[in-house]
Every structure is written in structure tokens, then in C-alpha cells.
Image: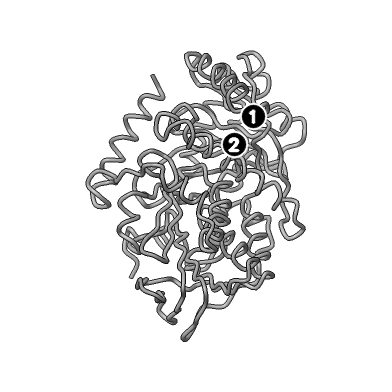
């Protein structure tokens, strides 16, 4: 029986995609079989989101025999339901990273982040991925006091990192670009962009399958026994593998306690409006940019390829989704766009992502032949996709990029996995209060 903390089944029906506008618009892949009997492989990947599918693709391309075990469907979790924003840089700004890991590693982390966006651009150009990469992300400030930092940070990236794709946007121009009086100034980053995430996940699954990876759905892993080889169990199979890649992110559950003390699931919510005409779209966001604002409980939004406004906002701290997601997200949406009060919301859905204490991804070697890559903290579309490529090259003996990521300190949540939820609720309430000040 599912208990409240079983995030794979707490808010979703087994084997069914959520009622997102993405899933509604896409043609899902025919179901992959469930794993049965005794199986062997070089690498067993647990989880078929961006990290797992990308790992499977890049390993199969290197000639490894790969099995992917997915408890639900490919792209079922955060990978297929997120806001679709492909952000340059890491989740922490370069100033913070320089303090955290020093200038050398901060520069390497910037380069890795740039490679992650480039990988998504390249994948989007593959015919197997039926999605278009749209350039440009606006970062507006919800308080004028943040404008000087935005200006200074854009200049820092221009001058110290040789990154010329970002510029400061003054308040008047920002309000024109976003069609809202809710903001002051901010930045426009043309190196970032947005894409349909579910189509990207489906495309990765097609590419991994065609490269020879064996993908199994409805095959929930119940245990991993480390050793050489490792043994991975589901209710119906036992897989023997030389290497294991844990790519579970917010849906890890109790599979590995060492990761669970550092990586914590939280839920986030998105609504999709009825389709709008081009003039209505331009009045809300010009040039088809994506937007992510400066609030700690961030509002992020963009237009889909079928001209729906996709608006993400509102967080809850229980593990169950609220009964009325539309009402939860409509509130922050109307704070920015009061003119949308009569607009129909055709879809509303929630998803589970994973955060870390310092908001940087958690890359770890668990034993000699198990890699874990997770904790993307809402900045996962590009980084999770690259993480799969990094896992593949690490297994092949090139661990340089993995080690740079793994060197970033990854503190435990106070009180471990038992206390992390109540403490997080307190922290989030404090930050959401601060957003209003």
C-alpha cells in the first residue's frame, strides 16, 4: 500500500502521465515492457528522466550494454512536467560559487553549465526530438533594490567570464517586454532559452532506444546491493550490473539514505491558459522570451509552442498536491498580470523536484561502481541532461567533469531525512515572507 511519502504514487496514477498541457499535446511513445526474470548488463540506470535517459544514450553510444529501470513512464517525473527553461550558469551565481569553491572551480562550473545548454541546443536539432529551442530568458526584479546587483552581475559575466549574451535591462524596457508593472529592472540572457521538456524527454528515450539501450517501464526498483557486480531488484526482476547510475532526483524515496540526507523533494505547480493569439502573446511577453523573476519562491513563465501561457508559481510543503492547483497558481499569476483575470486555465499540474541545502547539484560516488546525480534545485533541464553525459564519460574512465561537480560541498539537511521537511517548511515560510517585504 502507498504511504503518504511515496512520491511515485502519492499524487499520480501508476503508469499515467499527469494532466499537463505537454502530455496532452504530445504523442507518447508506445509503452516499454516491464522488466522480468534475471537480467545482466554493463550499466543499470535507475530512473528515466533527463539524467537517466541521457546517461543511457551516451553509454549506449560508447558501446555499453545498458538497462534503464523506470518505476512509471519515461519522462514521467520533473523532466516531463517542468517549466521548460534552459538556464545559463549554475543555480548559484558566480560570485557565490567563487566564495564557495574558489575562482578556478567556479570557472570550471561556469564552463560545465555552458556545455549543458549547448547539449540541449544540439539535442533539440535532432529529428528524434520534436521540440524547438527558443532563445532568451528575462530575469526581472520584483524590488528596485536588486537592480544594481543585476547590472553589476551582467557586467561581471561580460568582463570576467567573456560572456556577451547577457545585458542589464532598465525598468521601463523590462515593463515593456513583460507587459506588467510588477517589476523594476533586471537582465536579458540570450544564451539561455526555453523548450518543451516533455518532448525533449521523449526524444532522449527514442535516441537511447535506437542506440541499443533496453528501457523498462513500470519496473520500480526496491533495492540495490552494492558489490562487483551490483544487484538491482524490482518485484519481478533481478538485474546484475557492473555499474549503477542513480538518476531518481525527487523520487529517490528510501532507495539510498546517504543521498536522501542531502537531497530533498519539494513540489511545484504550473497552469496553462487557453491558447492566445499572437497579439495577446506579444502584449504579455515580447519576442517569445521566457521569464524567471527574483523572488525566492520564484514565478517562472513562458509561452508554449501552441501559444498558451505556462505559468509556474506557488509552492506547498506537504507531499500531497493541493486539491485546487488552479487557485494556488492563479494568485501569483494575477499579481503580475491582473489583465488575465477572465482567462481560462485549461490545465493545472504539479511535479516533484529535488533541492539541496546550497541549491547546487549533488554528484556522489557511492561505493566503487555506483554514481548518484541529483538535486538540481529547479535548474535541472540542461544540467540533468548534461549529468547523464557526465555519468557516461565517468564510467568510461574520464571523471574530470564529474569530480568538479562532486567537489562542490553538499551539506546534509539538519536532522537528516526525518527532520528536513518541518525545518524546510519554516525556512520557506521565512523566505516567502521576505519576498513580500
Q: Are the residues tagged 2 and 1 within 8 Å (C-beta)?
A: yes
Quadrant including the N terminus = bottom left
**Image: 339 above or below 197:** above
Which residue is most to the bottom?
37
Report the residue marked by disc 2: 88
Q: In which quarter of the view is residue 434 placed?
A: top left
Q: Element type at marker 2?
A: loop
**Image: 136 above or below 73:** above
Q: What is the x, y in percent for residue 319?
A: 36, 51
Please indicate whether residue 154 sits to the left or right of residue 331 in the image: right
Q: What is the x, y in percent for residue 350?
A: 49, 49
Viewer-proximal residue among 220 and 413:
413
Residue 323 visible, this orientation: no
Report the residue marked by disc 1: 189
Residue in view at x 66 percent, y 67 percent: 29
Of mark 2 and mark 1, the one earlier in the sequence is 2
Residue 53: image tag:
none
Q: Element type at marker 1?
A: strand
Other residues around mark 2 within 10 Å, as few (<14) / some (14–19) / many (≥20): many
**Image: 160 above or below 251:** above
Amino acid at each position: 500500500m502507498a504511504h503518504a511519502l511515496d512520491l511515485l504514487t502519492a499524487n499520480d496514477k501508476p503508469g499515467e502521465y499527469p494532466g499537463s498541457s505537454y502530455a496532452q499535446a504530445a504523442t507518447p511513445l508506445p509503452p516499454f515492457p516491464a522488466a522480468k526474470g534475471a537480467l545482466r548488463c554493463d550499466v543499470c540506470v535507475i530512473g528515466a528522466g533527463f539524467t537517466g535517459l541521457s546517461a543511457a544514450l551516451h553509454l549506449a553510444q560508447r558501446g555499453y550494454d545498458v538497462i534503464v529501470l523506470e518505476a512509471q513512464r519515461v519522462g514521467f517525473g520533473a523532466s516531463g512536467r517542468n517549466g521548460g527553461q534552459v538556464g545559463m550558469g549554475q543555480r548559484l551565481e558566480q560570485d557565490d560559487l567563487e566564495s564557495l569553491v574558489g575562482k578556478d572551480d567556479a570557472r570550471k562550473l561556469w564552463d560545465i553549465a555552458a556545455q549543458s545548454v549547448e547539449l540541449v541546443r544540439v539535442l533539440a536539432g535532432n529529428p528524434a526530438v520534436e521540440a524547438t529551442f527558443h532563445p532568451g530568458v528575462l530575469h526581472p526584479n520584483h524590488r528596485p533594490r536588486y537592480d544594481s546587483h543585476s547590472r553589476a552581475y551582467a557586467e561581471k559575466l561580460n568582463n570576467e567570464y567573456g560572456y556577451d549574451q547577457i545585458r542589464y535591462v532598465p525598468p521601463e524596457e523590462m515593463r515593456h517586454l513583460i507587459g506588467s508593472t510588477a517589476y523594476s529592472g533586471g537582465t536579458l540572457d540570450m544564451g539561455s532559452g526555453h523548450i518543451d521538456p516533455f518532448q525533449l524527454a521523449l526524444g532522449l528515450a527514442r535516441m537511447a532506444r535506437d542506440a541499443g539501450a533496453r528501457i523498462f517501464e513500470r519496473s520500480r526498483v526496491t533495492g540495490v546491493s552494492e558489490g562487483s557486480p551490483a544487484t538491482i531488484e524490482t518485484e519481478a526482476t533481478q538485474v546484475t550490473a557492473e555499474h549503477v547510475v542513480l538518476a531518481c532526483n525527487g523520487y529517490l524515496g528510501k532507495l539510498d539514505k546517504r543521498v536522501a540526507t542531502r537531497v530533498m523533494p519539494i513540489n511545484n505547480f504550473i497552469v496553462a491558459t487557453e491558447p492566445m493569439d499572437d497579439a495577446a502573446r506579444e502584449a504579455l511577453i515580447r519576442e517569445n522570451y521566457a521569464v524567471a523573476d527574483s523572488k525566492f519562491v520564484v514565478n517562472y513563465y513562458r509561452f508554449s509552442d501552441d501559444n498558451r501561457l505556462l505559468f509556474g508559481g506557488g509552492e506547498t510543503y506537504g507531499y500531497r498536491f493541493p486539491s485546487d492547483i488552479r487557485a494556488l497558481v492563479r494568485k501569483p499569476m494575477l499579481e503580475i498580470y491582473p489583465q488575465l483575470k477572465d482567462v481560462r486555465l485549461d490545465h493545472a499540474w504539479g511535479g516533484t523536484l529535488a533541492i539541496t541545502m546550497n541549491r547546487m547539484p549533488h554528484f556522489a560516488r557511492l561505493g566503487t561502481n555506483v554514481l548518484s546525480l541529483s538535486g538540481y534545485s529547479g535548474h535541472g533541464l540542461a544540467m540533468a541532461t548534461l549529468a547523464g553525459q557526465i555519468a557516461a564519460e565517468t564510467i568510461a574512465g574520464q571523471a574530470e567533469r564529474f569530480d568538479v561537480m562532486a567537489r562542490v560541498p553538499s551539506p546534509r539537511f539538519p536532522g537528516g531525512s526525518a527532520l528536513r521537511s518541518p525545518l524546510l517548511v519554516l525556512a520557506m515560510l521565512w523566505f516567502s515572507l521576505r519576498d513580500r517585504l
